[in-house]
Amino acid sequence: MTTTTLAEQEEACLYDELRHALEEVEEGKQRHKMLKHMIRQLKFAKWRKERFHWFDQYFQNVRPVTLWIMLATGALMPVMLFSIFIWVSLWVE
């Protein structure tokens, strides 16, 4: 899970990296290619921050009981599915 400060730090780091990369590379195709790559990274970081905002908010407010129920359900689901598979296969025979 990413927090908003972590996402902002990552975005600031990408902007700094873009500025340094543009200073190092001369004009031309290489600079244009690097610029497009960095813009893609920035758009992805922004998209990820917006997309996971609701996810982060939910897990900041989740209670331990809810978390234990989710873990127990996830752990027992394969056992239940396997049991149902065995029961159905015995019933079909």
Image (cartoon, rainbow, N blue to C red):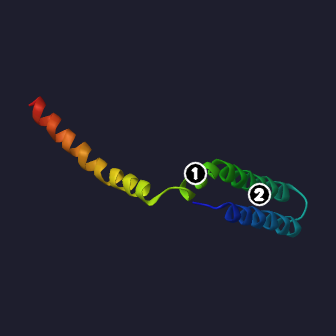
- Mark 2 residue crowding within 10 angstroms, few (<14) / some (14–19) / many (20+): some
Q: Amino acid at mark 2?
A: Met
Q: Is residue 72 left or right of residue 21?
A: left
- Where residue 1 appears, as percent x and y from the top left, is 57, 60
Q: Is residue 16 left or right of residue 59?
A: right
| Badge nearest the viewer, 2 or 1 | 1
Residue that carries the numbered disc 2 in the rendered image: 38
- Mark 1 residue crowding within 10 angstroms, few (<14) / some (14–19) / many (20+): few
Q: Residue at x 28, y 49 (%)?
A: 78
Element type at mark 1: helix
Q: Quick one: label 2 or label 1, which is nearer the N terminus?
A: 2
Q: Spatial distance from mark 2 to mark 1, Cα to Cα?
A: 26 Å
The quarter holding residue 86 reads top left
- Where residue 36 appears, as percent x and y from the top left, is 79, 52
Quarter holding the C terminus is top left
Q: Amino acid at mark 1?
A: Phe
Residue that carries the numbered disc 1 in the rendered image: 55
Q: Residue at x 88, y 68 (%)?
A: 23
Please tell me which residue lies in front, 62 or 39: 62
- Where residue 83 appears, as percent x and y from the top left, is 19, 44
